[in-house]
Image (spheres, rainbow, N blue to C red):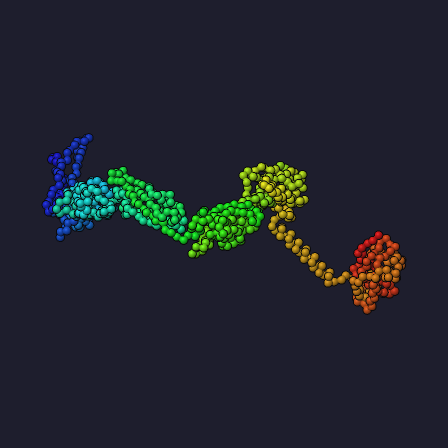
Amino acid sequence: MDNTVRKPVVVITSLVNGVAFVPVGHLSLHRHRQRTGKEGQVLHRSKRGWVWNQFFVIEEYTGPDPVLVGRLHSDVDSGVGNIKYILSGEGAGTIFVIDDKTGNIHATKTLDREEQAQYTLTAQAVDRDTNKPLEPPSEFIVKVQDINDNPPEFLHGPYYARVPEMSNVGTSVVQVTATDADDPTYGNSARLVYSILQGQPYFSVESQTGIIRTALPNMDREARQEYDVVIQAKDMGGHMGGLSGTTQVKITLTDVNDNPPKFPQSVYSMSVSEDKVPGEEVGRLKAKDPDLGDNGMVSYRLIDGDGLSMFELSTDSETREAVIKLKKHVDFETKRSYTLKVEGSNPYIDPQYIAWGPYKDEATIKISVEDADEPPVFVAASYTFEVEENAPEGTAVGRVHAKDTDGISCNNVCVSTPPCRYMIPLYTDIEQFFRVNPEDGMITTTRPLDREAQNWHNISVSATEIGRNARHHQDTKVRVDIRVKDVNDNPPEFATNNEVLMCETVMPGRVIETVSAVDKDEMAHRQHFTFSLAPEVAHNHNFSLKDNRDSTASVYVLRKGFSRLTQDVYFLPIKINDNGVPAMTSTNTLTIRVCSCDSRDTILSCNVEPYVLPPGLSTGALIAILACIVILLAIVVLFVALRRQKKEPLIVFEEEDIRENIITYDDEGGGEEDTEAFDIATLQNPDGANGFLPRKDIKPELQFSIRPGPKVMKKNIRPKCVFKCRCCVCRIRQVLWFRKRDRLWIVDTLKTLTASSQYGGLIIKKQQLQG
């Protein structure tokens, strides 16, 4: 028996640039070595039928036919077509196709290595009829071979760079970087070389790194500030046929202090009129410095000249010019010209360029004084005076002083006519609190001033030239500020609300309020308020006051048991002294209101205590109670209305039918004249006089209804006073009386007392009783 077992052999070839290659170690004939196992069993160790390697397909192939990638072949393939080759994996069936009979693999599409550099495929040989695998599947890789099809690109361009002017040759400016999408591991497709196309001879570029450097010394920003440089990157190591890309680099020279300031002129001429006041501008000059920012800043100063005491120099912050201003008054008659020397220099000097100095320049200024017809000039730019408030009319405030152009004082009283006259313009003192003496400039008050109403007065005083030689009546004005000094003329008062809310349950010794005071007057140093109780409440038993000696006072409670039902408001007069000069005192009343509070001393109410229903009643019960109350009120109102419309019938004790109408009047009686017609005993007890005593144990029965009668008599009883009785009636309303069946009935307008056989019953209303 032959111990060697033949396995199918698969041969893979690849075609690169039209040449067929057989992969190294693609397949070798392997034998199955036979081993003897237990009990004589033969064991076989199988090996793979083929070993794969990498294959290459050139990218961007544009030929008319598909590219042959390789060929699969098995040694069991006898060429009769019983073996079928299968290909699977990335791009199988779309990019890569296989001839299932011959095993040829073709690429049907153009491949781009920059999109995908390699593909992983799986090959397998199966029986065409049964699809039974003849060999296990195995993977192989197809790599896309790179060609130089991508030019270099500057991804971060264009570039902007800055470099100081006057930099040394070789100073690094900026580094540019290009990228190439081709394979850097294959050939020179991604090997880049940099070169400069535009920007010589000022700059250069390193071919391998792309660093741009200065190529010329002493490049001056003042001569040229910006440069446009073009850099090229070329692949294939810069050789012929390589692809290239460019980028622009804008390089700006930054400024350094390499230029000293320079005055355009060495001598400047200026003039000033003698009527100019100090502070006015005389002229300007400027030194030029072509540098920028702090490097071009120039500072100025006066260094020499006979006008140093008359003029001053300042710098305009916006224009950076030297401004010459008048420091003192100039007089044409005294001196007609001045000379100044000004220096302009750089305050910031770069030590690197200090040898290029000096960084300063000088110029001479000649100033001539011009004659002018000047108005009067006040000796001070402004005046400030003080006057006490409440000062009487005519109190002197202060004096203003002006001079004319010839130097004669406007306050000179030795001459017959002063050269100028003073006045206060009305628009500056509308209420005319002040007046000024037109000759000597003395300002006085016209009425007492109140500091609390206005503590400062700002007026103007004008001086008008009135000399004989004056061509025009020129005038000038000066500001006068008058401060009204404080006098202690206002009493202190409470600073805040003077009402305090206090709980009924407050305990003795507790502070219920801390009062403070204010004063409209100015408080002097260490001046404070003192507090005390007014004399009329100094010994009260409810509250006390303690002065805290810090312009505050505390109100203490002296007792307990306050009740707002007994007294709900207390008034506590407090005396406040401001301790001023002179001292002012006032009495302010603190209102203390007693309130009901809860257990945490939170105020609940300070008004009259309302009736509160028990908390146990529900809402329905409360509504029912209110409804009952409303119904009862309605019944009472209805009853009263019915009583007003209906009169009650007379009570008759006799069983007779009374058919007379009772008419009431409201006339007063005639007094003693009427009383003489009646027996007073009968009036007091008419029933007893006739032997008739009504029974009280039975009610009288009415046999006949009361109906109007045809006969009514009336009698006005007008007793003024009834004497000789225990109860005297002094006033009796009108009494109606009538006779029925030999009986006299006497009826009052309100009630019926009784009836007697002779006079009947007398009903009276007692208005006033006398003994």
Q: Is residue 133 visible?
A: no
Left or right, residue 341 beside residue 600: left
Left or right, residue 21 beside residue 393: left
Q: Quadrant of the N terminus?
A: top left
Identity of the residue furthest to the bottom in this view: 710
x, y percent for residue 196 = 18, 45
- Depth check: give the residue in front, 700 or 398: 398
x, y percent for residue 727 = 84, 54
Identity of the residue furthest to the left in this view: 19
x, y percent for residue 240 = 12, 46
Q: Is residue 363 visible?
A: yes
Q: Residue at x 36, y 49 (%)?
A: 369
- Depth check: give the residue in front, 688 or 764: 764
Residue 24 sits in quarter: top left
Residue 628 sits in quarter: bottom right
x, y percent for residue 324 = 35, 47
Q: Residue at x 66, y 40 (%)?
A: 535
Left or right, residue 80 beside residue 303: left
- Depth check: give the residue in front, 455 or 480: 480
- Report the number of numbered marks: 0
Left or right, residue 411 beside residue 243: right
Say if 53 sits above or below 270 in the image: above
